[in-house]
Image: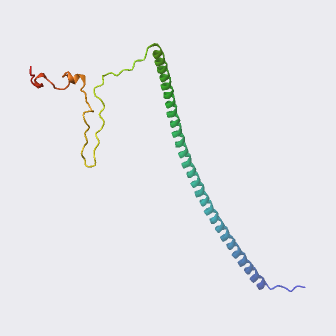
């Protein structure tokens, strides 16, 4: 049968088992603490990550709202310009219609407001030496009618040369 067990031996076995149990319990508690610490670190990192994503989203949403506002303002300006252009086009069409109606009833007269006062004088060519070649008497200049009559400037009768009459 079985041999009777020694109480001291049993007590030693009991203490050894308790020590093993205590060591296993402390190891389990340490592992649980480490797991909780890692979990809290992961939760903190997750919170920081989510916060960065939310901040980036908020910045992007703000930027898009601003862009939308600018787009609305641009659309408003363009609509005003289009309305102004339509008004100008309508005015131009009515003016053109009036001009065409007037032109068909009255003969067109195109005349200068003032008489021609001078003839064209071509530029005088310059030689490489810097001497200006003057053309002969073929180039003429005529004074305006008012100048010939002595009306322009500060011309007075006392400035005229004495007549030989």
Task: Residue 154: give x, y in percent of width and height.
Answer: 16, 26
Q: Quadrant of the C terminus?
A: top left
In the displayed structure, would residue 93 be above or below residue 130? above
Direction from residue 8 to residue 33 in the image, left or right? left
**Residue name at image x 46 percent, y 20 percent:** 95
Q: Quadrant of the N terminus?
A: bottom right
Q: Nearer the viewer, residue 155 or 39?
A: 155
Counting every numbered tag in the picture gives 0
Task: Residue 140: give x, y in percent of width and height.
Answer: 26, 30
**Residue name at image x 48 percent, y 23 percent:** 92
Q: Quadrant of residue 68?
A: top right
In the displayed structure, would residue 35 be above or below residue 8? above
**Residue at the top extreme of this rendering:** 105
Q: Nearer the viewer, residue 133 or 117?
A: 133
**Residue name at image x 29 percent, y 42 percent:** 125
Q: Nearer the viewer, residue 12 or 22?
A: 22
Task: Residue 82: give x, y in percent of width and height.
Answer: 51, 30
Q: Nearer the viewer, residue 154 or 43?
A: 154
Q: Quadrant of residue 50?
A: bottom right
**Residue name at image x 64 percent, y 68 percent:** 34
How are the residues colored? rainbow
**Residue at the right extreme of this rendering:** 1
């Amino acid at each position: 049968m079985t041999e009777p067990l020694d109480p001291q031996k049993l007590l030693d076995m009991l203490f050894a088992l308790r020590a093993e149990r205590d060591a296993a319990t402390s190891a389990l508690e340490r592992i649980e603490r480490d797991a909780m610490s890692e979990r809290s670190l992961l939760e903190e990192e997750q919170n920081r990550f989510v916060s960065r994503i939310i901040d980036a989203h908020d910045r992007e949403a703000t930027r898009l709202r601003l862009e939308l506002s600018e787009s609305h303002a641009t659309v408003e300006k363009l609509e005003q310009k289009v309305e102004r252009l339509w008004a100008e086009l309508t005015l131009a069409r009515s003016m053109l219609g009036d001009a065409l109606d007037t032109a068909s009833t009255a003969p067109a007269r195109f005349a200068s407001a003032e008489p021609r006062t001078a003839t064209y004088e071509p530029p005088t060519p310059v030689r490489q030496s810097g001497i200006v070649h003057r053309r002969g008497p073929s180039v003429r200049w005529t004074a305006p009618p008012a100048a010939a009559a002595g009306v322009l400037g500060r011309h007075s009768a006392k400035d005229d040369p004495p007549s030989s009459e």
